[in-house]
Image (spheres, grey):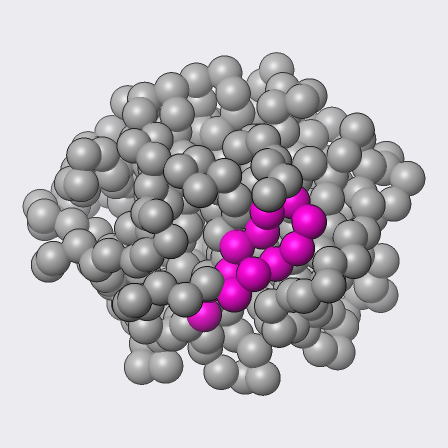
């Protein structure tokens, strides 16, 4: 089996490479800022059910970070960490404004970077925040345009966070940005659709293509087998198995429950004894403890709040 390095991990994008802009998705809102303290969060033992939460590995602090998301009652701005099989809520302030569909990834320098997202399902954001394991700090300076549902991951080869695409004010985007040293730089790759990227939502249909980010450019791969075309799936690195894991998404208008693995050459459909219920836009991230953590997402009946771990080619649900 061909092994690929753990840093080569990217979320599923919601943008097609080289696609024409779609119908404008929303009217831009002013860049959001946190100016007043929110009401204290209700103390609960675990995150509540939500859609569009952001989940990222925080290797420097040996945990997984969860921020925000959306519920029927509104957007969320809560911060949680997962370590040792337990969720812990942070009371840090200030925090990023409430949002869903934000991009989030560790930066290789002891921080987790959060970018953009949307509020109330319409207002896209372009702010950047940094988490140091205990507190959030707003990052000043220009960066990508307002957008949500980006593909974002850390590239150990360059020591930078790579951001691709997303749903912007004027439709889907296909640009690539790099974050390092506390600021954003727009990349000029020779092709826009190893970081691995699969599928997403094209201008007229879902996508099923596979791309790798190598030496500062995108290269399309042509594996013999692939998951069905879909959007809203999630991917994370499985250190124990030495493979990428993809789960869920929406295909043909229906949430999916299948799990796939990527070994550097091809996709393989997994056959675990049990699987999380069908869902789209789940949070998925590598747990520094060696597993892959899945939380929440959008199921056929609405927001989900369950927690699962992937280890040794099997899913295990965390008791509620």
Asked if one can make out residue 195 in the rendered structure from this viewpoint, the answer is yes
- In this view of the protein, which residue sits in the foreground, 303 or 192? 192
Image quarter of the N terminus: top right
Q: Is 1 situated above or below 50? A: above
Give the image quarter of residue 228.
bottom right
- In this view of the protein, which residue sits in the foreground, 69 or 216? 216
The residue located at (25%, 38%) in the rendering is 82
Residue at the far right: name it. Answer: 190
Q: Is residue 267 magenta?
A: yes
Q: Is residue 179 magenta?
A: no
Instruction: Please give left or right for residue 232 compared with residue 172 in the image.
Output: left
Q: Which residues are magenta?
A: 258-269
Instruction: Please give left or right for residue 148 compared with residue 162 in the image.
Output: left
Image mark count: 0
Instruction: Please give left or right for residue 184 compared with residue 104 in the image.
Output: right
Asked if one can make out residue 145 in the rendered structure from this viewpoint, the answer is no
- In this view of the protein, which residue sits in the foreground, 217 or 43? 217
Q: Is 149 situated above or below 79? A: below
Image quarter of the C terminus: bottom left
Q: Is 199 situated above or below 181? A: below
The residue located at (74%, 27%) in the rendering is 185
Instruction: Please give left or right for residue 172 compared with residue 279 in the image.
Output: right
């Amino acid at each position: 089996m061909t092994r690929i390095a753990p840093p080569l991990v990217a979320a599923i994008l919601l943008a097609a490479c080289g696609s024409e802009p779609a119908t404008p998705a929303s009217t831009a809102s002013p860049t959001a800022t946190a100016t007043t303290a929110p009401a204290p969060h209700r103390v609960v033992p675990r995150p509540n059910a939500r859609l569009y939460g952001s989940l990222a590995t925080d290797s420097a602090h040996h945990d997984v970070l969860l921020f925000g998301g959306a519920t029927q009652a509104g957007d969320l701005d809560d911060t949680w960490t997962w370590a040792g099989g337990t969720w812990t809520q942070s009371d840090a302030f200030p925090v990023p404004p409430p949002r869903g569909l934000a991009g989030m990834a560790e930066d290789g320098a002891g921080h987790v970077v959060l970018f953009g997202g949307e509020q109330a399902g319409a207002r896209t954001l372009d702010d950047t925040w940094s988490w140091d394991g205990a507190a959030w700090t707003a990052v000043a300076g220009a960066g990508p345009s307002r957008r949500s549902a980006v593909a974002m991951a850390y590239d150990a080869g360059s020591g930078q966070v790579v951001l691709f695409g997303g749903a912007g004010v004027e439709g889907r985007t296909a640009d690539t940005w790099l974050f390092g040293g506390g600021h954003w730089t727009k990349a000029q790759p020779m092709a826009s659709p190893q970081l691995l990227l699969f599928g997403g939502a094209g201008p007229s249909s879902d996508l099923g293509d596979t791309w790798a980010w190598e030496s500062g450019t995108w290269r399309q791969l042509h594996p013999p087998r692939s998951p069905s075309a879909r959007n809203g799936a999630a991917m994370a690195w499985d250190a124990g198995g030495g493979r990428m894991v993809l789960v869920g998404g929406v295909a043909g208008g229906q949430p999916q429950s299948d799990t796939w693995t990527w070994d550097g050459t091809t996709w393989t459909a997994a056959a675990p004894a049990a699987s999380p219920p069908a869902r789209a836009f789940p949070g998925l991230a590598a747990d520094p403890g060696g597993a892959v953590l899945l939380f929440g997402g959008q199921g056929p009946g609405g927001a989900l709040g369950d927690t699962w771990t992937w280890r040794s080619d099997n899913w295990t649900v965390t008791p509620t």
